[in-house]
Structures are given as structure tokens and as C-alpha cells.
Image (tube, helix red, strand yellow):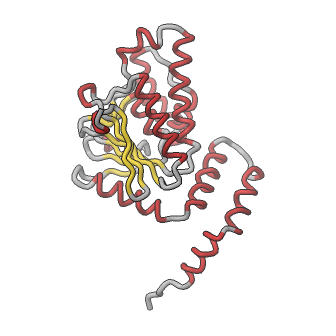
Amino acid sequence: MNLEQRPIFCKKEEGIASIYINRPEKRNAINSEMWQQLIAVVDDCNSDSSVRVIIFRSTSPVAFSAGADISEFKTARNSPEKGEEYHQVLSDLEERLLRSDKPTIAMIQGYCLGGGLELALACDFRFSDPTGKFSIPAAKLGIIYPVRSTKLLIHLVGPSRAKEILLSGEMMDVTKALEIGLINRVYDEKELEKETYQFAKTLAGNSELAIRGMKKVIHFIMDGEGEDGLRALFEESLISEDYKQRVRSFMNRPRNN
């Protein structure tokens, strides 16, 4: 099968890994096999030292992802045991993204719903064009949203907004999503790709050690941890050759009068 015919595929270029969701006929609804493929691709990117930034995107402007493939629910989530197995796969993917040393960006066009938004929430950044539409319809389906994903949502928008999103299941447009902090930036449809990749190149050009460390610091704070567990990380940064070289470069940079 040609790479670009697969429902999940990845392209790597100049330190940036682009992970594509490619099921346009189903608005990129993600089935069990695709969730597993996403885990495998993320594992590959996390272990590849040449990859500095990971971008999730769609092959179609119609949808980033309309969420989990509900047609599977009659078999994949028809008992507590199967439901737990299904949830564990999504949890494993989230864990890989949250603990990844690489910055992650969700580049959103069109529908970003349910499991698709869950994937985007696990990324460090969410950029959208004006076509972005956001919803978590769990309450409409009788599903209780997972604890970790709910925690991520609360950190972004606060408890009251999280309740509004989860309990109503209503769709929101990109203007409201930006207003409440669900997404980071909005770009014109013609500019989204260029601006997303320019930001990724900026991240790729910064200190890998510093980015890795700062992501860990942020997650320690979110998890309510103290700073003792990060002392070794701070010490590592101060004795690294990367730190010394970047300080020398900064001090020797041309100065404007």
C-alpha cells in the first residue's frame, strides 16, 4: 500500500514529523486499528533523535477528526472489560504524548470532536483555521469522559467551562474556542500550514535539553509535585555543552545601537 493511502502515516523533514490522519470518507473517525497505529507512529517519533517536533494534521480540510469511530462501540465497548481495554489504548497514546520530550502541535481544520479533541488536548499546542469546530459529545452518547482528559481540559479552560463543554456536548466555533483557551492560535485558512510549520521550526531551533526540561517542569506543576524531583534536571542543564555554547552565542550576538 502506498504510504499516503494508509489511514495513519508519517512524513519526516527537517526535524519535523508530520503525522497524518487519513480517513476523509469518515471525517477521520478513528477506529481501534488507527489508535494502535497512532501509538506506533508516536513511539517511532519519540525514539528518533532526528525528530524535534511532532505535528498532527489531517489530509482533508473537512475534519481534523470527528472522533472515535462510533460504529465500533457495539463490539469494542459493549462491556466493562472491553470498554476498559479500549480506554487503555487511548490512555497509552495520551501518556506517550504528555511525556514526550518533543513539542507536539495539533493543526486543526474543520471538525475536531470527541476522541479527535482528546488527541488535540494531549498535544502541547492547538492551532486552527476559522473552519475549526469543537465538541465533546460524551454526554449525548452516555459516556463518562476519562479522568486524565478531563484534567487536561480543566487546566486549559477551568472547571466551569469544562462542565459547560462536557455536560452540554454543544458545538463551539473557533472564536469561542480561542476565547476560552481551548486553542492557542487561529490563522487564515491559507496561512495555517505555513504559520504552524514556522512555529515548529522555531521550536526545533531551540535547545532540545531546555525544551525537554521545561516540559517536565510544567507537568510536575500540573501534577502537584515538588521541585526536588527536578533538581538533577536543572543540574544537567547547567553543565551541558549545549548551555555553554548557547550562552556564548547569545553574548557574542550583534547588538543594535
Is residue 43 toward the left or the right of residue 179 in the image? Answer: right
* 122 relative to 198, above or below: above
Quadrant containing the N terminus in the rendered view: top left
Name the spot of residue 38 as percent of width and height, x first.
Answer: 44, 34
Q: Is residue 164 visible?
A: no
Name the spot of residue 144 as percent of width and height, x first.
Answer: 51, 19
Q: Residue at x 50, y 83 (%)?
A: 253
* 104 relative to 254, above or below: above
How many numbered badges does the structure rendering display? 0
Quadrant containing the C terminus in the rendered view: bottom left
Q: Residue at x 54, y 85 (%)?
A: 252
Q: Residue at x 44, y 28 (%)?
A: 35
Name the spot of residue 97 as percent of width and height, x first.
Answer: 52, 41
* 68 relative to 189, above or below: above
Of all residues, the one furthest to the front in this rendering is 1
Of all residues, the one furthest to the bottom in this rendering is 257
Towards the viewer: 176 or 153: 153
Is residue 202 toward the left or the right of residue 249 in the image? Answer: left
Q: Is residue 117 visible?
A: yes
Q: Residue at x 52, y 22 (%)?
A: 87
Of all residues, the one furthest to the right in this rendering is 228
* 178 relative to 25, above or below: below
Name the spot of residue 52 as percent of width and height, x first.
Answer: 48, 55
